Image (cartoon, grey):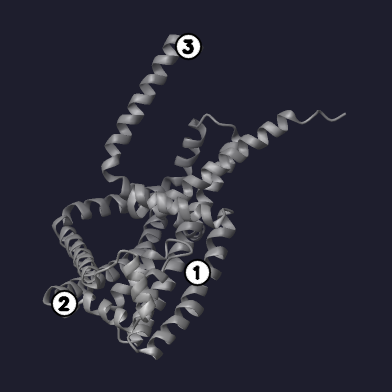
Amino acid sequence: MTQHPLQQKTFLLLLTLVTIAFGAILWQFHGAIFWGMVLAILFAPLHRKMLRRMPRRENLAALCTLGLCLVVVILPMSLITVSLVQEANAIYERLRSGQLNFGAYFQQIVAALPTWAVGLLERLNLTSVAQIQQKLSSVAVQASQIIATQAVSIGQNTLEFLVGFGIMLYLLFFLLRDGRSLALRIGQATPLDNEHKKQLVTKFTTVIRATVKGNIVVAASQGALGGLIFWILGIQGPVLWGVLMAFLSLLPAVGAGLIWVPVAIYFLATGAVWQGVVLTLFGVCVIGLVDNILRPILVGKDTKMPDYVVLISTLGGMAMFGLTGFVIGPTIAALFMASWDLLASSEESQQAPPAA
């Protein structure tokens, strides 16, 4: 049955409007929906193994996979978050009471510098060491206040967090159970060539799996190693600094060095030579090698994207979408590159002369 052009345009307009409206309704819980989709993609192979062990029992297989997801991913993250909040509050209290004084630490570093370095600071318009101390102290206090405020806001928004968490688990269960049929329906409704759809879907799932698994393994490894060496050297709040190193390790190339390098410089400048040397060697030879060895194997090999594209897309994604941007950014970049590759290959095939 053929449709009149006006009817077809009206239907397309209606389809666009209801799609936008549905997206606006879901946007309130976009984080929970996104992570539900990500976890469903990550645990889909495990769910398929469960189905082979218990055929025709889709609900039980999805429920068992969901339980393993809770034990493997969500429970450890909850325990780390509780420890992080406790240590952040402890450091904030020490800053407020004056037990931690970053201005004094900076003064010790400046006192250990040679005369030419102090003169260079003055020529760079950093004339007053006291001003720098004040700025550093204010930045440290503001950072600790932000951490404490976020911890309090998490407590105040417990209901909203629980609702989002429940939606994520609820959606994850149904995506595991009905994901295959849902993907087929979306594929049938997408107006693209079948080969293009297959390549784009493959690229999408590959990038999400590689980005999440690779970055989480690298972040967990660097955070654990950084927290361990901080604990061995007797630095206050090793869990907090370990979590910060894990978070910063989501940024390729720079990562955890933004935490341990200043601490190593402080040790060397204040006469704690062996601590500074140990931390520097450990940071370069152990923490750095984790990034240089594991990330190309786990992320770059599967995504087939250059490191600079991964870095820029990660930074842009996190700036736009927050923490979830470390997955969304590289995924959009990979789909962008894959789409242009498909366009270029299709144009080349059209321009190729016919075989004689």
What amino acid is labelled 3 in the image? Answer: Gln
What amino acid is labelled 1 in the image? Answer: Asp
What amino acid is labelled 2 in the image? Answer: Arg
Query: Residue 99 appears in which quarter of the rendering?
Result: bottom left
Q: CA distance from mark 1 to mark 3?
A: 57 Å
Q: Is residue 216 left or right of residue 92?
A: right
Residue 215 appears anywhere in the view = yes
Q: Is residue 192 left or right of residue 104?
A: right
Of the pair 348 and 137, the residue shown nearer to us: 137
Of the pair 258 and 150, the residue shown nearer to us: 258
Give the numbered dot on residue 52: none
**Residue density around tag 3, few if under 14, some if 14–19, many if 20 or more, within 10 Å:** few
Query: Residue 66 appears in which quarter of the rendering?
Result: bottom left
Where in the figure is residue 241, as x and y percent of width and height? 32, 73
Where in the figure is residue 63, as x and y percent of width and height? 36, 57
- Please give the residue where the numbered disc 1 appears in the rendered image: 291
Residue 56 appears anywhere in the view = no
Relative to 180, say whether 302 is above or below. below
Secondary-structure class at tag 2: helix
- Please give the residue where the numbered disc 3 appears in the rendered image: 3
- Please give the residue where the numbered disc 2 appears in the rendered image: 94
Q: CA distance from mark 2 to mark 1?
A: 33 Å
User: In percent of the image, x 56 and y 43: which residue is there?
Assistant: 337
Residue extending furthest toward the left: 97
| Label located before the other in sequence (2 or 3) | 3
Secondary-structure class at tag 1: helix
User: In percent of the image, x 22 and y 79: which residue is there?
Assistant: 104
| Marks 1, 3: nearer the viewer | 1
Secondary-structure class at tag 3: loop
